[in-house]
Amino acid sequence: MEQRTIKRFLKNPSSLAGTIIILCFILIGTFGPWLIGDQGLLIHLDMELKGPSAGRLGFAENGVDVLTSLIYGARISLLIAMTSTVISLSIGIVYGAISGFFGNRIDAIMMRIIDMLLAFPGLLLAIYIAAILSPKTINVVFALCATGWVGYARVVRAQVLSIKNYDYVIAATSLGAKTHRIILIHIIPNILGPIIIQASFGLASLILAEAALNFLGLGVPPGTPSWGALLDQGVSYLFIAPHLAIFPGICIGITVLGFNFLGDGLRDVFDVKSQ
Amino acid sequence: MQTGTASQINEKLQKPKELLQIKDLKKHFATTKGTFRKTTQIVRAVDGVTFDVFKGETLGLVGESGCGKSTLGRCILRLYEPTSGEINFDGQNITKLKSEDLRVLRRRMQIIFQDPYASLNPRMTVGNIIGEALVIHKLFTDKVARQKRVAELLSIVGLRPEALFRYPHEFSGGQRQRIGIARALAVDPQFIVCDEPVSALDVSIQAQIVNLLQDLQAEFGLTYLFIAHDLMIVKHISTRVAVMYLGNLAEVAPSSELYVDPKHPYTRALLSAVPVADPTRKKSRIMLKGEIPSPINPPSGCKFHPRCPEVMKICSEVTPPLIQISEKRQVACHLYVLN
């Protein structure tokens, strides 16, 4: 099944396109800054706010090279999105699995807590948290996780509820398996499909949320070139140097599109009925 | 030698020993509603069942879908918590056993499932599925020894040892059922609940699996509770048969007698519905009125009375107890209380 899944994944145009786009950005974010070297970081005061020319995407205020900032930005934006997703996912899986597996009163209480969190618009809560904390990259991750895990917890719970009554789970119980063994070996591996799909959509929305936080000036510390922060800086010069806002916008757009393609593709790949 | 055979004969002459005694077992499911989990309805899936299973025998348990057969089987294994009643296994009351004692007990009783596609974890290799019990109970700590034991189990159920590293989807329904049987055998159980083990299989495969179960019983001295709705398979495999209707036992009898001379009107109706492969024989099918009632709101008195062709006035008022009508037969019907 594993091999068939991989084969279907590679044959699906949507998941393939998504993977290529995201891989490109990850490679750029990982190796880009190292390739540019110190040259790219030079400040060209004479070129301040100059538009794109051959091989360059123009310069920002103080003569900072836009292309260099975007490459550093890819690293920071993707890192924030991925770290937040991994943390949210871990919390979500543990919370959802406990709630779904034990059911009854525990489930009722845990789900009411989630309902309360969902009553706030997610981004608003993130803005609130980011506003009270100091502007640090780690705090952005924290603000995004604070609301991000809720969605995963709900998906995991729903999946656990449906799978915990499968015969192979009951068989494990009748063999004398302990609860943690049943959850870790028999339930979690069998619900990974929907969770991975959710995570790829989640990554897209986290990139947007991170950009939104930075755009509102509540994100990474000043001077850190995340895409959202670059967009924020560009807005002030929208009429005299539109390239400052356009290029980070394009980067955000393409990455989000890439993750959404991946999510769509994964959904088709994991959905047996769509074959 | 002489004394050995004599004592064996003696043992056979002696009354068979009970391995399992069920006393007035009930399992009610409550459907809840709202945040405060208010009970709205009670499903009486198993509603006071009493019977014994003797060592080495196969007790067939038959009844329509939804009559509580599977629930009863799972309650016995403590996979569901019984609402009330008592389960004695080999002289030990297991109704209230707590986690650690229960885990020890799990080695002695096992279950085989109906659906061979849902009963095996799709992400585990066959070797890991069968070997899991050995890991849980720390029977073989050495990996090589464990693999050897799993290969041995595979050959016992008629599969090749190569199956060890394959995944369940690579096998057919019948083969998967064999894997499920090997998993149950891994812990050396004394008692196995076979929860409709052949209902989901092709007719040709059904015979193979039933024969395998019989061979295993002879080889390992197993005791079966064989749940099914196919009366002919039950006749073939069972020593005794219990007929269940809407959470209660209607009749318990040796298989040889039940099929020849059914006592309870429900048993008669069930048996008359079995197709006979003889076109010249005249069918006298007893048609039951109406549908099987809901276990949420079962009829008063005898639960079978609204559909019974021989219903009497007393039937809707008094619940007939399961009474002994001959040495080996029990029936719950007012027709026999009167006599």
Image (spheres, rainbow, N blue to C red):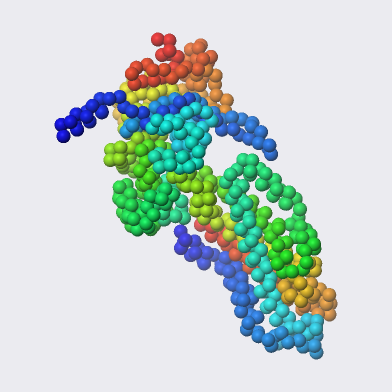
From where the camera sits, is residue B265 visible?
Answer: no
Q: How many marks?
A: 0
Is residue A265 placed above or below A158 in the rendered structure? below
Instruction: Name the residue rendered at 70%, 48% in the picture.
Output: A113
Instruction: Name the residue rendered at 57%, 65% in the picture.
Output: A15
| Picture quadrant where residue B310 is located | top left
The answer to whether A225 appears left or right of B57 in the picture is: right
Is residue B83 placed above or below A140 in the rendered structure? above
Coordinates of residue B99 in the picture (x, y in percent): 50, 41
Coordinates of residue B139 in the picture (x, y in percent): 38, 50
From where the camera sits, is residue A154 visible?
Answer: yes
The answer to whether B27 appears left or right of A144 in the picture is: left
The answer to whether A128 appears left or right of B150 in the picture is: right
Find the residue positioned furthest to the top. Answer: B339
Is residue A214 placed above or below B63 in the rendered structure? below
Instruction: Name the residue rendered at 46%, 63% in the picture.
Output: A3
Please identify the quadrant where the C terminus of chain B is shown. top left
Instruction: Name the residue rendered at 44%, 45% in the picture.
Output: A175
| Picture quadrant where residue B92 is located | top left
Please identify the quadrant where the N terminus of chain B is shown. top left
Coordinates of residue A2 in the picture (x, y in percent): 47, 61
Q: Nearer the viewer, residue B144 or A204?
A: B144
Find the residue positioned furthest to the bottom. Answer: A46
Coordinates of residue B43 in the picture (x, y in percent): 56, 30
